[in-house]
Amino acid sequence: MTSEQDIWSWLSDIPDPEIPVISLVDLGVVRGVEWASDHWVITLTPTYTGCPATTVINLSVDTALRDKGLENFVIKQQIAPPWTTYWISTAAHEKLRQYGIAPPSAAGGPTACPRCASGDLERISQYGSTPCKAQWRCRACLEPFDYFKCI
Amino acid sequence: MTTELFEYLLRLGDNSLVLGHRLSEWCGKSPILEEDIAISNTALDFIGQTQLWLGLAATVEGQGRSADDLAMLRDVWDFRNLLLVEQPNGNFGETIMRQYLFDAWHVLLLDGLTRSHHQEISAIAQKVVKEVRYHIERSRDLVIRLGDGTPVSHEKMQIALDRLWPYVREMFDVDPVEHTLIEQGLIPDTSTLRAAFDAEVLKTFATATLTLPSSNFAHLGGKSGKRHSEHLGHLLTQMQWLQRAYPGATW
């Protein structure tokens, strides 16, 4: 018999399609795993409304659970309460930094360059390669880098 | 009530859809790479918002139509977007001015919609307003930089403002459809948002060294569907071409 913990642990092995160093659970998009009398309900929430990764995320969850032999489940979309970067786990912040992405910060911008740790930074654009990221540059090592926007 | 609610949700969805499509026309040919990325990201946000609003409209209508059906299979006279958002992109400055005028209203409207008694409207607004706060931060910044930039950029921004200002009043025009929904606490009274809008844009235009046009003339007829400009039909021929040529085509 599959337990709720089994499902959470399987989900935490599924990488985010655009930032594969963190998992869907790290990203905070898995909002619930519940047994509803005869089937499991997996509740997911989108990061940004137009993020193309949302479709891929649904598909990865579906595929991963079926690969584990689970069949009696449905994937439910939920938009309220809206996703926030505060749901990204602390462990994921470190993984993001090592990957070269400055983690979200309540200050509204990155605190240190993910490469050289300098705090001398400037914003290039509030928009980046994906809806969730902005482009910044380090004035010390001169490298541009992605910053995970705080929303 | 259902008729009015459906009508209003079409307005929200069509604003996002038409503006999102307009912005996507810049994809690959914006003045600089960062702006190309920013404009395309913004377009993507609007298309995402369209799916939510038109999805809810389709549910409220209850005729078995989907968000895609509403977006791709209606003609000009069925669209309920503001005249402002269907205006052509023009030069980059005009696109940014159109965006700023829309954003300044949009952020106030969504803030009001978060308090809607309709649970799903409130949920969508709470989600969307977070994205829209980023939109106005960028469009306001660019209006100031271009308005208070070189003589050439200043002149282009002043021309853009003169041309687009007559489309502002439609955003604050309350008609019977909105009256019904305001009374039920489903939507904010947009006419009460005008003071906050004026405060926002006047401050920005002062910093951007731009002058507000003195004329009070206003173009109306987009959100009621009575009189769209000729530009909407041309936009739809592009946007809906695939579904018209190959009905029912899917990925």
Image: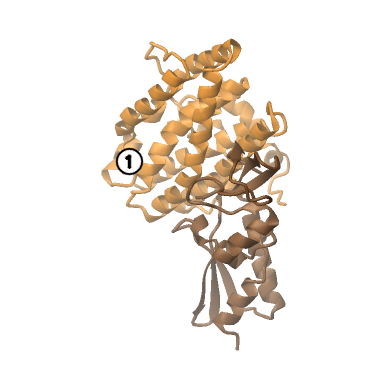
Chain colours: A brown, B orange
Please name whichever residue, B229 or A137, is drawn nearer the observer in this view of the structure. Answer: A137
Residue B94 x, y percent position in the rendering: 57, 21
Q: Secondary structure at mark 1?
A: loop
Q: Residue at x 57, y 25 (%)?
A: B95
Residue B25 x, y percent position in the rendering: 66, 31
Residue B25 lies, with reference to residue A87, above or below; the image says: above
Please name whichever residue, B168 or B213, is drawn nearer the observer in this view of the structure. Answer: B213
Residue lying furthest bottom in this view?
A1
The chain holding disc 1 is B
Residue A18 x, y percent position in the rendering: 68, 55
Residue B39 lies, with reference to residue B152, above or below; the image says: below
Count of numbered circles on the image: 1
Q: Residue at x 43, y 13 (%)?
A: B211
Is B222 on the left or on the right of B184, as rendered? Answer: right
Residue A69 x, y percent position in the rendering: 69, 81
Q: Residue at x 56, y 34 (%)?
A: B18
Residue B212 lies, with reference to residue B170, above or below; the image says: above
Q: Is residue B75 visible?
A: no
* Location of mark 1 (residue): B188
Q: Amino acid at mark 1?
A: Pro
Please name whichever residue, B76 or A104, is drawn nearer the observer in this view of the structure. Answer: A104
Is B202 on the left or on the right of B62, as rendered? Answer: left
Please name whichever residue, A106 or A65, is drawn nearer the observer in this view of the structure. Answer: A106
Q: Is residue B11 visible?
A: yes
Label 1 crowding class (10 Å Cα cut-off): few <14, some 14-19, many 20+? Answer: many
Is A32 on the left or on the right of A21, as rendered? Answer: left
Q: Residue at x 44, y 25 (%)?
A: B221
